[in-house]
Every structure is written in structure tokens, then in C-alpha cells.
């Protein structure tokens, strides 16, 4: 009931702005699409004014909640995504193949690591209706991609000198145009 009341109070153009803002996460683009006559700076100003209004912010929050669920549900989903990336990124061939027996493990023995499998192909060689050999080809999802996405989440690929002010080297140009400081010795 609260959602309908919020929607009914906002003009259609403001509702469209809210929907576009949730879609793009770009206030200027959302304002340009909601108000066709606005472009550039004027759209940016209009968007900033709209985003100051509590009823607009409530409506945007309600739209985001409809899409993503509650904050707790979004956190749970994020944890699941990160767990999947960990399974992919840290998968090990030993989880799928036993070198001693020269054969693959049964999927039931692999457990949750089966989620790192992109594709599975099983072929059976039969001779006279009797199974001679069974071959299993497993292709795993890209470990590199899994680790890259997980690393980005952990911000591992940002500059390691954060918090340290790095100054540009100063160029000394004396007022007299020579490489000798004024009043200095050569």
C-alpha cells in the first residue's frame, strides 16, 4: 500500500526519472531520458534537485528493494556470488582427477566443487554391447576470471601506495633563464 501511495504522489516524469536512475545509476542520463528538453548541465541540475527530495529517494529505494530484495537479501546474494568465485578461482585439478587410479572422481565425491565445472562430457566405448572404456572430459570455468573478479572485489589491484601523497617532481627554472640560481655560483 505504501508503494502505491508513493507512486501516486510523484508526477509521471519524476517516476520515469527514478526508474531510469535505478536502471543507469547515472543521474544526468536519467534526467535527460525523463525530461526530453533537458540536456547536459541543465539535466544534471534537475537531477540533483530531484535527488534532494525525500519522496524521490524513498521511491528510488523502493524500486531498488523490488529489484534486489532487502538489504539483508542483497548481502546474502553478494556472499553467494563471492563463494562461487572462490570455488572457481581456487579449484584444483586434484578435486576432479585421481592420478593414482588414472580416473576421474565421481561427481558425488567432488561435492560443492562441482560448481566450478563449466561442462562435462562422458563418452562410453562399447564393444558388442559391453562397456570397454568410459571417458570423462571436464572443463572448468576460468580460474583467472574467478580470481580476477574476486581480486577486484577485495581491491587487490589498486595502487598499494594509498594514503601517501605523491608529489610531481619540481622543475627548477631560475628567473634569469640560466641553469644557475640568481646570485648563485656557477
Image (cartoon, rainbow, N blue to C red):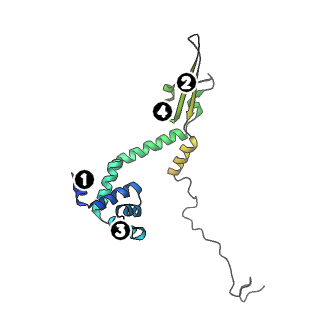
> Which residue lies at the image location 53% right of the left edge and 39% below the top edge?
88
Relative to 108, is 60 on the left or the right?
Answer: left
Measured in 3D between alpha carbons, the distance from the residue under mark 4 to the one under mark 3, in whole angstroms, is: 50 Å
Measured in 3D between alpha carbons, the distance from the residue under mark 2 to the one under mark 3, in whole angstroms, is: 60 Å
CB of mark 1 within 8 Å of CB of mark 4? no
Residue 64's place in the image compared with 36, above or below, is above
> Which residue lies at the image location 35% right of the left edge and 48% below the top edge?
67
> Which mark is in front, 4 or 3?
3
Which residue in the structure is indicated by mark 2?
Answer: 122
62 or 151: which is nearer to us?
Answer: 62
Which residue in the structure is indicated by mark 1?
Answer: 3
Residue 3's place in the image compared with 141, above or below, is below
110 or 42: which is nearer to us?
Answer: 42
CB of mark 2 within 8 Å of CB of mark 4? no
Which residue in the structure is indicated by mark 4?
Answer: 112
Relative to 3, is 175 on the left or the right?
Answer: right
> Which residue lies at the image location 38% right of the left edge and 70% below the top edge?
45
Residue 99's place in the image compared with 38, above or below, is above
> Which mark is in front, 2 or 4?
2
Q: Earlier in the sequence, mark 1 or mark 4?
A: 1
Mark 4 falls on what kind of element? Answer: helix
Residue 71's place in the image compared with 87, above or below, is below
Q: Earlier in the sequence, mark 2 or mark 3?
A: 3
Which residue in the structure is indicated by mark 3?
Answer: 46
Q: Earlier in the sequence, mark 1 or mark 2?
A: 1
Amino acid at each position: 500500500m505504501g508503494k502505491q501511495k508513493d507512486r501516486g504522489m510523484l508526477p509521471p516524469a519524476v517516476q520515469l526519472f527514478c526508474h531510469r536512475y535505478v536502471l543507469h545509476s547515472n543521474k544526468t542520463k536519467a534526467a535527460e531520458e525523463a525530461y526530453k528538453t533537458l540536456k547536459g548541465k541543465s539535466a544534471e541540475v534537475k537531477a540533483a534537485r530531484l535527488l534532494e527530495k525525500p519522496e524521490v529517494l524513498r521511491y528510488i529505494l523502493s524500486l531498488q528493494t523490488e529489484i534486489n530484495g532487502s538489504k539483508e537479501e542483497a548481502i546474502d546474494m553478494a556472499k553467494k556470488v563471492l563463494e562461487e568465485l572462490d570455488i572457481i578461482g581456487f579449484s584444483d585439478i586434484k578435486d576432479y582427477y585421481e592420478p593414482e587410479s588414472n580416473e576421474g572422481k565421481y561427481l558425488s565425491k567432488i561435492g560443492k566443487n562441482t560448481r566450478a565445472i563449466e561442462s562435462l562430457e562422458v563418452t562410453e566405448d562399447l564393444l558388442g554391447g559391453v562397456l570397454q572404456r568410459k571417458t570423462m572430459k571436464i572443463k572448468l570455468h576460468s580460474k583467472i576470471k574467478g580470481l580476477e573478479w574476486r581480486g577486484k572485489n577485495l581491491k587487490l589491484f589498486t595502487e598499494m601506495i594509498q594514503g601517501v601523497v605523491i608529489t610531481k617532481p619540481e622543475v627548477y627554472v631560475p628567473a634569469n633563464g640560466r641553469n644557475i640560481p640568481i646570485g648563485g655560483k656557477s
